Image (spheres, rainbow, N blue to C red):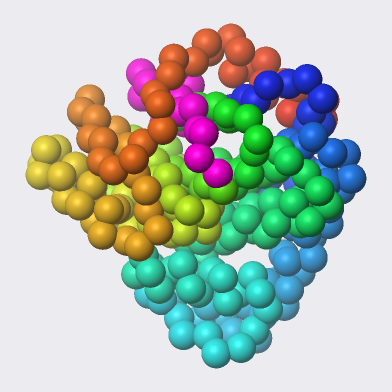
Amino acid sequence: MISTECAGLFKRAFEQGESVCTLISDREDAIEAAASSIKFHRRKLEKFVQERPLFLYSLQPVHIEAGPEVVRLMAGVARRADVGPMAAVAGVLADLAVEAMVVEGAEVAVVEDGGEVSLVSDRPVDVALSAGDSPLSKRVGFRLHQFPAGVATSSGLYSHALSFGEAEAVTVFAENAGLADAAATAVGNLVKGDQRASIKLGVERALSIEGVRGVFIVYRGLVGVGGEVPTIIGVDIDDSEGERRSAKRGGA
């Protein structure tokens, strides 16, 4: 769930291939620009991986000297987090869509792609924690004030994305969503086994990655927090259901 001051904002649910998105802005033309950006960059990425399948399957950083912007950005943040480039795909697509919104003059530009969120805003934005069956899921969230920002969550239990860890949720806050996405994967892979030791290791790993601002880890009933985590807030679960219904309808 993503929540902002609703007056004057447009919201749309949008899907393109594996990108399942919520787009929010103060300008309707910016919503169109975001959707066009996701379509454009997904096509570029899909063509590239047909020619370079290593980029699609590698679990390690892949060196890229030339290629589409989306590919170069994915490779760059993956290298910083020491993961495969596809770990950053949703976040980078969200960042590029937000960039397109800002070019259109948007002062509120929020794109959520499969749970990874890129944000530029002139007002606070609330993002709910999504952690499957965890008691904290959809009941706590984060109020962001510092922009641009990226938020991403990796789960070893509840996500369809590949993770070698066991955490209910590893949420990373970073300078952009692509980096947050890659870093959440890197940290999530470490959170397994001994609870306190792995949470400590995860926090240390997150804060060692340049551009990561903070991390919030939920693992077997324990919570670990490190760095600059936005204000933690309570979330009304009924409100979160309403947000999802609105997004599916494409309402503003």
Q: Position of residue 15 (x, y in %)?
A: 76, 46
Q: Quadrant of the N terminus?
A: top right
Q: Position of residue 192 (x, y in %)?
A: 20, 46
**Residue 138 shown in magenta:** yes
Task: Compare residues 135 and 203 and report the one nearer the observer.
Answer: 203
Q: Is residue 147 left or right of residue 189?
A: right
Q: Residue at x 73, y 66 (%)?
A: 41
Q: Position of residue 52 (x, y in %)?
A: 59, 84
Image-quadrant location for residue 81: bottom left
Q: Residue at x 26, y 59 (%)?
A: 208
Q: Quadrant of the C terminus?
A: top right
Q: Main secondary structure of the magenta part?
A: loop
Image-quadrant location for residue 205: bottom left
Task: Give the vertical position of 75 relative to 113 (above or below).
Answer: below
Task: Give the vertical position of 196 relative to 1 (above or below).
Answer: below
**Residue 50 shown in magenta:** no
Q: Position of residue 114 (x, y in %)?
A: 59, 44
Confirm whether residue 184 shows in the render.
no
Magenta residues? 130-147
Q: Residue at x 44, y 15 (%)?
A: 234
Task: Compare residues 67 and 163 and report the one nearer the observer.
Answer: 67
